[in-house]
Amino acid sequence: MQLQKLFTILVFLAPALVLFTVFLIYPIAQSAYYSLFNWKGFGPAIDFVALDNYSRILSDKNFLRAVQNSLLIVALSVALQLPLALILALMVGRSLPGRAFFRVTFFLPYVLSEVITAVIWRSLYHPDPHYGLINAILVNLDTAIVPWLGDVKTVMPAIFVVLTWKYFGFHMLLYMAGLQSIPADLEDAAKIDGATSFQTIWYIIIPLLRSTIRTTVYLSVLGSIQLFDLVWILTEGGPAGASEVMATYLYRFGFIRFYLGYGSAVAVVMFMICIAFSLIYQNVFKEQEYVGGYGA
């Protein structure tokens, strides 16, 4: 009987395991293998270099800058984008007049693909005021034209504005879903006890939203580390590598310069960073939720 149950379980798991192995495990193993070779993508990988690719990655200033930019996006997302999404969720989900309209408006950018979003904002940032709306407004205000995507000082803030416009609606929707699970009786009881709106939000709503906040932080960090489409279409990592992130660095060496062995090593490093963060999250934050209960 036990063997029959085991066989049934394996039969139902087999399709998923095959897909998981073919499309996830095998590519990861293949990247790890090619990362040990100086391979250009043509013919078999025979020039074994052991860990030289990894040593080169850690000593490359361009890669270190890419890591720095990725971490900057992570920090700004957690410090600015997520709080903005939470504030808007509290406004749209509660007492803001016309909240149904604002819900659709704020979430609409997330529906657009990253390619379309990048093309739209590249046009808005165009340095010629005849083509770029933002610089056209600056000209009308008698302000100097700003090369948003062409200046090393403004390119990263400009990219982060696009990221915020694109993704904060998604996080707002998650926070709104979390707010729906909070009983209104708790807020009513707080008001009866004399709590202000700020005190109700700070001491009741936010603690009960901790699990949702942890989820949004998790998704935001992983998404920032793997960011590619928006940055590549907006700037291709320029100017002078000022907006290079890890994914664009990987693409540049792996698919443009055909250093596929080196690019595979970069992919493995990115994978290890994501795995390390995921394990820390699972072992620290999730464990606290299980021990402390809901919203702990």
Image: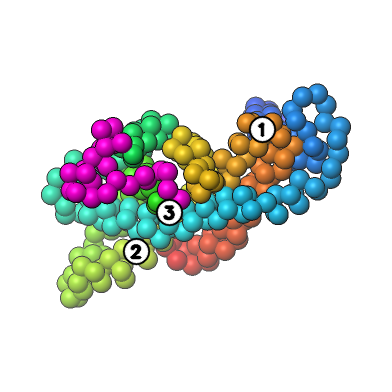
Kind of residue at disc 1: Arg
Magenta residues?
A: 128-153
Residue 134 shown in magenta:
yes
The mark closer to the camera, 2 or 3, is 3
Position of residue 183 in the picture relative to residue 254 (left or right): left
Colour option used: rainbow
Magenta residues, dominant SS class = loop
For the N terminus, the quadrant is top right
Kind of residue at disc 2: Ile
Q: Which mark is residue 257?
A: 1
Which is more N-terminal, label 1 or label 3?
Answer: 3
Q: Which mark is residue 60?
A: none
Q: Could you tell me residue 53's position as x and y percent? A: 76, 45
Marks 1 and 2 sit apart, C-alpha to C-alpha, by 48 Å
| Numbered-mark total | 3
Position of residue 21 in the picture relative to residue 207 (left or right): right
At 71% across and 43% down in the image, what residue appears? 265
Report the residue marked by disc 2: 206
Could you say which quadrant of the image residue 226 lies in? top right
Residue 21 appearing in the image: no
Residue furthest to the bottom: 194
Q: How packed is label 1: few (under 14 Cα within 10 Å), some, or many (20 or more)?
A: few
Q: Could you tell me residue 289's position as x and y percent? A: 50, 62
Could you say which quadrant of the image residue 192 lies in? bottom left
Relative to residue 189, is residue 220 depicted above or below? above
Which is more N-terminal, label 3 or label 2?
Answer: 3
Residue 142 shown in magenta:
yes
Report the residue marked by disc 3: 153
Which is more N-terminal, label 2 or label 1?
Answer: 2
Q: Secondary structure at mark 1?
A: loop
Q: Secondary structure at mark 2?
A: helix
Position of residue 185 in the picture relative to residue 7 (left or right): left
